[in-house]
Image (cartoon, rainbow, N blue to C red):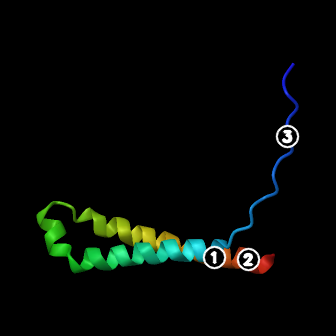
Amino acid sequence: MPAPRRPDPEPFESDDVKIVTFGTVLWAFALAAAIAFHDRLSDGGNEGWTWIFLAGTFLGLIGVRYVRRRAARR
């Protein structure tokens, strides 16, 4: 006979807007660094990183907009 199941814990409340904004800022800093060191990245064959950081920043901005709208609805 299995042991009785413990009750589920209460959901953890977090500030999603701050978390997503912080992540987007990190992507933007990485993009700025990739642009600043573009020549060095190109010499090493890593010019694709700039596009990755651009995509991360763009998707982060979409995420910030989404969590702000969701927070406003609550």
Q: Amino acid at mark 2?
A: Ala
Disc number placed over residue 40 in the picture, else none? none
Residue 44 to residue 65: above or below: above
Say which of marks 1 and 3 sits in front.
3
Residue beneath the point at 85% across and 27% down: 3
Relative image position of residue 45 (x, y in whole percent): 16, 60
User: Tag 2, which secondary structure?
Assistant: helix
**Image check: 49 left or right of 58?**
left
Q: Nearer the viewer, residue 4 or 24?
A: 4
Residue 72 to residue 43: above or below: below
Which residue is disc 3 drawn over? 6
Of mark 1 and mark 3, the one earlier in the sequence is 3
Q: Which residue is outermost to the top? A: 1
Q: Residues within 10 Å of mark 3 (few under 14, many from 20)?
A: few
Quadrant showing the N terminus: top right
User: Tag 3, which secondary structure?
Assistant: loop
**Image check: 47 left or right of 43?**
right
Residue beneath the point at 27% across and 73% down: 34
Q: Quadrant of residue 30?
A: bottom left
Q: Quadrant of residue 47?
A: bottom left
Q: Nearer the viewer, residue 20 or 73?
A: 20
Which residue is disc 1 drawn over? 17
Quadrant showing the C terminus: bottom right
Say which of marks 3 and 2 sits in front.
3
Q: Which residue is outermost to the left? A: 43
Which residue is disc 2 drawn over? 71
Callouts 2 and 1 close, C-beta under 8 Å: yes
Q: Residues within 10 Å of mark 1 (few under 14, many from 20)?
A: some
How far apart are the alpha carbons under marks 3 and 2? 31 Å
